[in-house]
Image: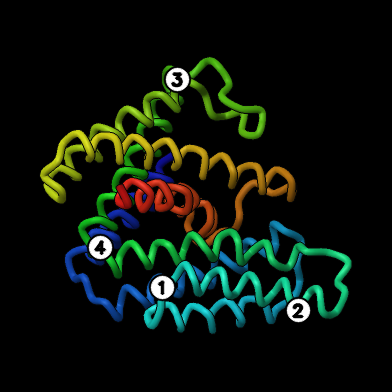
Amino acid sequence: MKTRIITGVALFLAVLAIFIIDSYLLNFIILGIVLFFSFVESEKLYGLKEKTLVIIAMIFYLLAPFSNPVFIAILSVLLVLSVLAHFKSESLRSVLPFLYPMTPIFLIWMLYSEFGIAYLAWMILTVVACDSGAYFVGKFYGKRVFSLTSPNKTWEGVAGGIFLGSFVGAFLGYFVTEDILHSLLTSLFVAAFGVWGDLFESYLKRNAGVKDSGDIFPGHGGMLDRIDGYLFGVVAMLWMLSW
């Protein structure tokens, strides 16, 4: 518990510094680092050993600032599928890391590059609030199991997390959009999707027979363990912003 809290506080301060500095180049580099470690961790979860896949992912990432990141992500998926078909591969697993986590990470870059750091901070802090609320409410009041995929998650914890995420997100979103209703609805969807992002990560780890995706962050596991909620939450955020 102590190690988890210390690491969590350190990560929060680091992210806060990134928000304040708001350097386009620095943020691109940091997200690239996130992509690299997340992609490598996902390969282990998918049972892949092709070391060239992460190199391909990073090459496509370098193209993201010059075009719509969604199109770049789709292009990379289609390219990998084309190569697999060309060589008559017996498995399509090699494309999985390009679908998750690469494509959602490209969407995070899209959110930042098109809407700015305030919207990225809004999304991230909403998921952080949801995670924190779910953890503490679940720890002290949780009784009913939310999903067999992750027996430690409870309905009480999920409800507490979504409530806190929605409340904090609505507060932050109001200063960004000056529309309290849209901020509340957006934060509600981001928090809910964040919960499912965390659950999906648990599903992958359970199938792979591992506790954490990695060991980069003491008490928190790997990179994917830290960003799983954002990878689903960013989709909800961009969807709501498209209204």
x 43%, y 46%: residue: 4
Q: Nearer the viewer, mark 3 or mark 1?
A: 1
- Residue 148 is situated, as x and y percent measured from the top left of the image, at 66, 28
117 to the left or right of 198: left
- Residue 183 is situated, as x and y percent measured from the top left of the image, at 22, 40
Residue 115 - label: 4
Q: Is residue 3 visible?
A: no
x 66%, y 48%: residue: 204
Of labels 3 and 4, earlier in sequence is 4
x 46%, y 63%: residue: 105
The residue under label 2 is which amino acid type? Answer: Val
The residue under label 4 is which amino acid type? Answer: Phe
Residue 156 - label: 3
Of labels 3 and 2, earlier in sequence is 2
Categorize mark 2 by other alpha carbons within 10 Å: few (<14), some (14-19), many (20+): few
x 53%, y 56%: residue: 224
- What is the secondary structure assignment of the residue under circle 3? helix
Q: Which residue is mark 1?
A: 68
